[in-house]
Image (cartoon, helix red, strand yellow):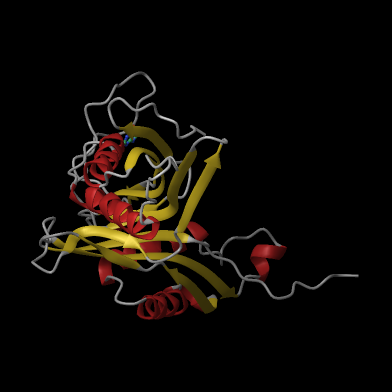
Amino acid sequence: MAHVLGQNQYGKAENRIVRVLRDGTRHSIKDLNVSVALQGEFADVHLTGSNANCLPTDTTKNTVFAFAKQYGIESAEAFGILLARHFVTATERGVVHSARIRIEEYAWNRIEVPDGSTGSSDTGEAGHSFVRDGGEVRTTEVVFDGERVQVVSGLQDLVVMNTTDSEFWGFIKDGYTTLPEAYDRILATQVTARWRYSYSGADGQDQPDWDRSYRQVRRHLLEAFAETYSYSLQQTLHAMGTRVLDNRAEVDEVRLELPNKHHFLVDLEPFGLTNDNEVYYAADRMYGLIEGTVHRDGVTPAIPVR
Ligand SMILES: O=c1[nH]c(=O)c2[nH]c(=O)[nH]c2[nH]1
């Protein structure tokens, strides 16, 4: 007995796209996860091996990136409507009956800096430095060994991005090197930071104001990320650790784990479009992982490496 092909749909899922708009030194970003699903006359594709009615998922992916350049992304809704209408009305022979576009949008805020020095104005907002909304976790680890208290506090999943002021070049080249030198790239990372307090619980020693200290360390990490013109994430790591030690006397040591969240420029040339650092593919893996400790001279680093 013949079986029946029931409901079916297909398309490219989870197109991770970052669109940068550059209005002078004030940039804005849209960060989306776009999934396409088409329904239509696809019985033959499933039943006979003929792909005559198959618009490749690869094409649906290209369309998402090309449309981001051509039309911009005003809102997820408007972008979704544009794409859904396109797949149904522009695919030849009416084979696509309906298109479903799902979009998750990640919200970003501008990093606050003392004088708006990295771009825009006197508002105190950085022009090209962003911190992703919510999601970060505050951590602490306390050890008492019968004599001394040791407090290592931290944060994880603080996601930040600079849309310019980042270069990476002059690195070692060997027979396996393909990475092009970059003179203006996106720098994005998901910060895991741990910092160790000098507080030891000795008699007469006051505890630091833990909440205030946390807020201030976080602020200095963000400011250093925003204000450092970077030639590598390693250099940015050092600047972030140094900024905390320079400003927070209660902290002796900072350990940072910084995954390099790669953003690759999408090649739009096949579609007759230029990509002047506007449309990026946000890869979630693999990623470079940059880790390091910055500590005061004379103190023995004690935050465990993991
Ligand atoms: O800031 C960077 N540091 C690296 O060590 C590195 N390696 C790489 O491929 N890209 C980058 N970027």
Residue located at (10% from left, 62% from top): 24
Nearer to the camera, 114 or 15? 114
- Residue 29, can we see it? no
Q: Is residue 116 above or below residue 203?
A: below
Image location of residue 177, percent across then percent down: 35, 26
Nearer to the camera, 155 or 229? 155
Residue 263 as seen in the image, left or right of residue 7:
left
Furthest residue to the top?
175
Q: Is residue 148 above or below residue 37?
A: above
Image location of residue 280, percent across then percent down: 33, 55
Nearer to the camera, 296 or 108? 296
Image location of residue 99, percent across then percent down: 51, 77
Furthest residue to the right?
1
Residue 72 placement: quadrant? bottom left
Numbered label tally: 0
Residue located at (27% from left, 45% from top): 244
Residue located at (31% from left, 72% from top): 73
Furthest residue to the front?
204
Image location of residue 265, percent across then percent down: 30, 50
Image quarter for ligand 1 equals top left
- Residue 80, can we see it? yes
Residue 232 placement: quadrant? top left
Nearer to the camera, 87 or 215? 215
Residue 119 as seen in the image, left or right of residue 140:
left
Quadrant where the N terminus lies? bottom right
